[in-house]
Amino acid sequence: MTEQQVYTLVEQRKGYELREYAPVAIAAVAVSGNLQSAPYQGFNSLFRYISSNNIAMTSPVIQRENAADRWTIEFVMPAGAKAEDLPVGTAQGVEVRQQPAQLCAVVALRGGLSNPRVLRKDAELRAAIERDGIKITGELQVARFNSPFMPVPLRYSEIRYPVAQ
């Protein structure tokens, strides 16, 4: 089984969970594209980086919205890895950085990630966060846990926002 990003469930809320994600090393690449095309553009560079440096594949692959049709695609490095100890990834256009612990509001999705579906879930999550008086502190994150070869109805993904209580 693929290693997954470490978190602690802080609280189950109506419509979402609050999770504390542990500090983690991230390998990231900036890409242009829409919700569906961006991950595929970034994946190859990141996969070459981990493959050429003998780093294990983990999940999820995180897609962060930076601006309209601008995304950062991120691979979470294995637990315990520190950014300063990992190889530089500039040859592949990869930035390696340490992400501190992060509190996130999270909602799960099963099946495909069409733009309308993600926008609807995003709006529902934002409304629930606002209802609970929690402040969003970062950009939308789409976390994908499965290979593109997984049948669409069986795929698991999450929509996340960094938050502060």
Image (cartoon, rainbow, N blue to C red):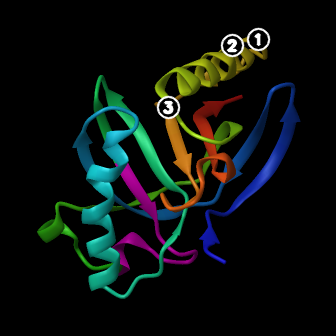
In the rendered image, the vertical position of residue 85 relative to residue 19, given as above or below = below
In the rendered image, the vertical position of residue 123 relative to residue 76, given as above or below = above
Q: Are marks 1 and 2 in contact (CB under 8 Å)?
A: yes
Secondary structure beneath disc 3?
Answer: loop
What is the span of residues highlighted in magenta in the rendered image? Answer: 73-85
**Circle 3 is placed at which residue position?**
140
Quick check: 91 left or right of 105?
left
Which residue is depicted at the point 54% across and 36% down?
A: 113
**Circle 1 is placed at which residue position?**
131
Residue 124 in percent (x, y) is at 68, 18
**Where does the N terminus fall, quadrant-wise?**
bottom right
Q: Earlier in the sequence, mark 3 or mark 2?
A: 2
Q: Residues within 10 Å of mark 1 (few under 14, many from 20)?
A: few
Of residues 131 and 41, the one drawn nearer to the viewer in this rendering: 41
Secondary structure beneath disc 2?
Answer: helix
In the rendered image, the vertical position of residue 124 relative to residue 139, given as above or below = above
Which residue is depicted at the point 31% across and 65% down?
A: 46
| Residue 2 is a magenta residue | no
Residue 19 in percent (x, y) is at 73, 45
Task: State the separation of the CA atoms marked 3 and 1.
Answer: 18 Å
Corner quadrant of residue 164: top right
Q: Residues within 10 Å of mark 3 (few under 14, many from 20)?
A: some
Of residues 38 and 26, the one drawn nearer to the viewer in this rendering: 38
Quick check: 15 left or right of 92?
right
Residue 57 in percent (x, y) is at 48, 75
**Mark in the foreground, 1 or 2:** 2
| Residue 76 is a magenta residue | yes
**Circle 2 is placed at which residue position?**
127
